[in-house]
Structure formats: structure tokens, C-alpha cells
Amino acid sequence: MKKLNNILPEGLVNFMQIRKSLVEAMQRLKQESIEMAELTLELIKEAFTAFQNGDYKAADAIMKKDDLVDQYEEKIAKHALKVIWREQPVASDLRLVTGILKMITDIERIGDHASDIAYMTTFLKSKLSDKVVPVAKEIMDNLESMYLMTIQALEMNNEALAQKVIEADEAINKGYKKALKLMTELIKKDEIEAETAVHTLMILKYLEKVGDHAGNIAEWIIFTLTGIHKTTELY
């Protein structure tokens, strides 16, 4: 940079230094968001395993990890505001900062749902019914694939992948409807306690909501790349 200082106009050198600082700040902000999303993915997977195995100890441990997600959200939000204040981003950079501030709200809610699943698990009296396992696992498998694809879309700035995430939500919705129908049949046949059925359905509903939040994140990823959120051009 010293050699450049001797060759380039002072204004251009200052611009290059500011731009370098902005790029580094944006990269750090994005990496933190990816790490937060990866953390919540692991928590959802751990919560489902605790639910499937009726593991109350594991469920309790998961609930205690929710603070880690909240801390990530606070840290990223502060960094994003510092980027706006210090770096004064415009155009695509400002879209990314705005999009990340929106994304971390959904990511934090996913962390909440992991805690919700763990909490509901503590009310179950036994392991997941063999008849419910295939349906629940189908929902979870689709969700894990969808959320992993969301994280990849963010990391790769991939609009097409983000669009696939949005489309993938339908499979999770169908899975939940299938589970609801199954629970109704099991209750009618007196093959499951009503209380257990209710808690199980609530857990599966939380998984379905995680799919909704993953879809929201994908919408904001597309916004960071195009300036369009759903059908509305924001900037």
C-alpha cells in the first residue's frame, strides 16, 4: 500500500482503504450468520434425537443452549449496525446488511423451536411410537436437507438454491398433514394416549415452523442478491 500511496491520488487510496475495510466487515458479518445458522441446525437435530429417544437429560441440555443462539443474534445485530454506521454501505452491500438483520431473526426463532421441542419432549412418558417414527423421521429428514440447503445458499450467494429451499417447504407441510391424520387414527383406535398425541403433534408442528423460517431466510437471501423480496422490489 505504501508504493500505491506514492503513485495513486490520495482520494483514490482512501477509497481503496475504505472499500477493503467494508469488504472485510461484510465477510465477517456473513460468516457469523452462517455460524449461527449451523448452530441452530445442530440444535434442531439434537432436539429431534432427544424427542425420538425420549431422552429427558439431553432435552434439558438443549434448552440450556438457547442462550448461545440469543448471544449470536445480539452480536451479529451489533456488528451489522456498526457496519452501517462506520462503513456507510450502499447498493448490494447495504442489501446484504439489511438481509442479514432480517435473517438472524428467523435463525433465532429456529433456535427457540429447538428449545420448544426439547421442552415438549420432557412431557412424553416413553420413546416415540413405532408407528409415528417413520412419519416424524420423514419430516425431520426433509427439514434437515432444506435447512442445510438454506445455509449453502447463503454461503454461496446462490439464488437458484435459495429458490429450491422455498419449494422444499411443501414437502414438510405435507409431512405434517400426514402426521396429523395418523395421530387422529391412532387416537380413534386407542393406540396412543391423547396427551402423548398432543405433545407429539406440537413437536412436529415446531419442525414445520422451522421449515417456514428456513423459507423466510431463503427469501432474504434472494433479496440480498436482487433487491426483490418475494414480489416487491425494495432496492
Image (cartoon, rainbow, N blue to C red):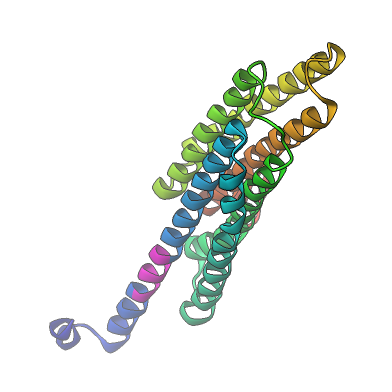
The residue depicted at 51 percent of the width and 64 percent of the height is 91
| Callout count | 0
Please tell me which residue lies in front, 128 or 176.
Answer: 128
Please tell me which residue lies in front, 38 or 64.
Answer: 64
The residue depicted at 53 percent of the width and 42 percent of the height is 46
The residue depicted at 55 percent of the width and 59 percent of the height is 100
Q: Position of residue 204 (x, y in %)?
A: 69, 33
Q: Position of residue 143 (x, y in %)?
A: 57, 33
Looking at the image, which residue sits at the far top? 189
Tell me if residue 23 is in the magenta stretch: yes
Main SS, magenta region, reads helix
Please tell me which residue lies in front, 103 or 41.
Answer: 41
Tell me if residue 167 is in the magenta stretch: no
Quadrant of the image containing the N terminus: bottom left
Can residue 16 be seen here? The reply is: yes
Q: Position of residue 41 (x, y in %)?
A: 51, 45
Report which quarter residue 172 is drawn in: top right
Q: Tell me the magenta residue range.
A: 21-28
Horizontal relation, residue 187 to residue 233: left or right: right
- In the image, residue 173 above or below residue 186: below
- In the image, residue 55 above or below residue 52: below
Quadrant of the image containing the C terminus: bottom right
The residue depicted at 51 percent of the width and 60 percent of the height is 96
